Image (cartoon, rainbow, N blue to C red):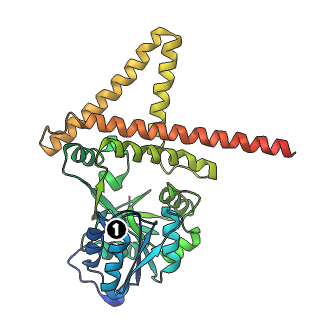
């Protein structure tokens, strides 16, 4: 890894050294978090005269648009756009096309941003000639409950998130395969064809893959920390990871690929469980394989839970962390399996139609 100079937040932001920045925020039904998001961006050190903030709303059914309109009346550089397609890639493309900044920065509505966030992203993008630059997540609970706190703790560990440095952190800046809520030069996004609107999920992952395939570099800056409010119960965690799993493999239908082994690991785990279970039904001694697989996984889950508990100097989460790890891996793996089945079925249907028309 190349050495990097750390970002010095004490350095003043010199207006003439910085380009205009357009912040695009896709959102839907974010009334609970939108105030915190916008207030943190407005309070950033970057000159407001060089900023525009575009909130692209996916037809919210709560008070999201009312909140945005209140801000547009107070701040002329904040605008509201309507996203009838209600998907994130459509929202991003709409925001990019409607914006004017040289730099495009993606922000998330249920997150808050430190005062140096915009300046840090832009400065690292330009100084290190990166094609995308962003920070890391500080994962916080959405609610003050034991399970919500446990989820936020679990997602910061490698056993839950693999080598996703945006979640597990990094000691120093590094070139990586993803960075959270970062920025690009407008010309970079235009060269890549912007976000693929066929992908309702995994559009960020797809963009990162396409960028790196063309020789682009993604810079992760650990000094830039974004507070992200994670799922607050097991049901929302399960549904979130099930959807992520589906899109991790369903992208194959469009000729795409997963960005990293971590997107395939849960599928391999679920297939191993299914395979050994079927083998055990057909050949009873193979039950030892299934038991061994579950035993190894259980040991790793307990070891990761103990490591986190020691790091945090509390045993509060020791009982719930293994359950959260298992829910995340199983949901993502089952979702990936379902997505793969859909890809196979669609391929067979296409071949059948082609043969019928021959």
Q: Is residue 261 above or below residue 128?
A: above
Residue found at the very far top of the displayed protein = 284
Looking at the image, how many numbered discs can be counted on the residues? 1
Q: Is residue 97 visible?
A: yes
Q: Is 212 left, or right, of 52 in this rendering?
A: right
Q: Give 106 or 64, whichever is nearer the viewer.
A: 64
Q: Is 203 left, or right, of 302 in this rendering?
A: right
Q: Is 188 left, or right, of 3 in this rendering?
A: right
The quarter of the image holding the C terminus is: top right
Q: Is residue 258 above or below residue 270?
A: below
Residue found at the very far right of the displayed protein = 358
Q: Is 345 left, or right, of 318 in this rendering?
A: right
Query: Which percent across, then down, holds residue 88?
Result: 48, 62
Q: What element does badge 1 sit on? A: loop
Query: Which percent across, then down, holds residue 177?
Result: 44, 56
The quarter of the image holding the N terminus is: bottom left
Query: Which percent across, then down, holds residue 344?
Result: 64, 39
Residue at the spot of label 1 = 63
What residue lies at 49% left-to-right and 25% top-to-bottom?
Answer: 274
What residue lies at 46% left-to-right and 81% top-to-bottom?
Answer: 102
Residue found at the very far bottom of the displayed protein = 16
Query: Which percent across, then down, holds residue 357?
Result: 85, 46
Q: Give 5 or 319, whichever is nearer the viewer.
A: 319
What residue lies at 84% left-to-right and 42% top-to-bottom?
Answer: 356
Q: Is residue 6 visible?
A: no
Q: Give 71 or 21, whichever is nearer the viewer.
A: 71
Disc 1 residue crowd, few under 14, some 14–19, many 20+, Cα 10 Å: some
């Amino acid at each position: 890894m190349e050495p990097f100079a750390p970002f010095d937040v004490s350095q003043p932001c010199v207006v003439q050294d910085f380009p205009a920045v357009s912040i695009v925020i896709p959102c839907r039904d974010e009334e609970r978090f939108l105030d915190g998001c916008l207030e943190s961006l407005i309070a950033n050190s970057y000159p407001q005269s060089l900023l525009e903030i575009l909130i692209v709303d996916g037809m919210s059914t709560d008070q999201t648009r009312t909140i945005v309109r209140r801000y547009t009346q107070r701040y002329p550089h904040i605008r509201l756009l309507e996203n009838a397609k209600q998907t994130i890639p459509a929202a991003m493309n709409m925001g990019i096309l409607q914006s004017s900044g040289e730099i495009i920065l993606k922000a998330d509505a249920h997150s808050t941003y430190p005062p140096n966030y915009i300046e840090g992203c832009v400065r690292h993008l330009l100084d290190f000639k990166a094609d995308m630059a962003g920070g890391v997540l500080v994962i916080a609970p959405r609610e003050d409950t034991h399970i919500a706190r446990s989820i936020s703790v679990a997602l910061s560990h490698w056993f839950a998130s693999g080598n996703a440095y945006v979640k597990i952190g990094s000691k120093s800046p590094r070139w990586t395969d993803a960075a959270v809520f970062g920025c690009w030069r407008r010309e970079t996004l235009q060269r890549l064809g912007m976000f693929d609107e066929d992908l309702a999920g995994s559009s960020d992952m797809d963009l990162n893959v396409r960028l790196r395939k063309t020789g682009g570099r993604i810079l992760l800056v650990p000094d830039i920390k974004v507070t992200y409010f994670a799922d607050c119960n097991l049901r929302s965690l399960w549904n979130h990871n099930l959807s992520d799993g589906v899109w991790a493999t369903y992208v194959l239908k469009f000729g795409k690929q997963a960005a990293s082994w971590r997107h395939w690991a849960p599928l391999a785990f679920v297939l191993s469980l299914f395979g050994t279970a079927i083998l055990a039904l057909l050949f009873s001694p193979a039950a030892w394989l299934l038991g061994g697989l579950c035993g190894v996984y259980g040991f790793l889950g307990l070891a990761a839970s103990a490591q986190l508990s020691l790091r945090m100097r509390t045993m509060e989460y020791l009982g719930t962390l293994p359950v959260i790890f298992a829910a995340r891996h199983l949901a993502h793996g089952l979702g990936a399996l379902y997505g793969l089945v859909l890809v196979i079925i669609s391929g067979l249907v296409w071949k059948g139609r082609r043969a019928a028309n021959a």
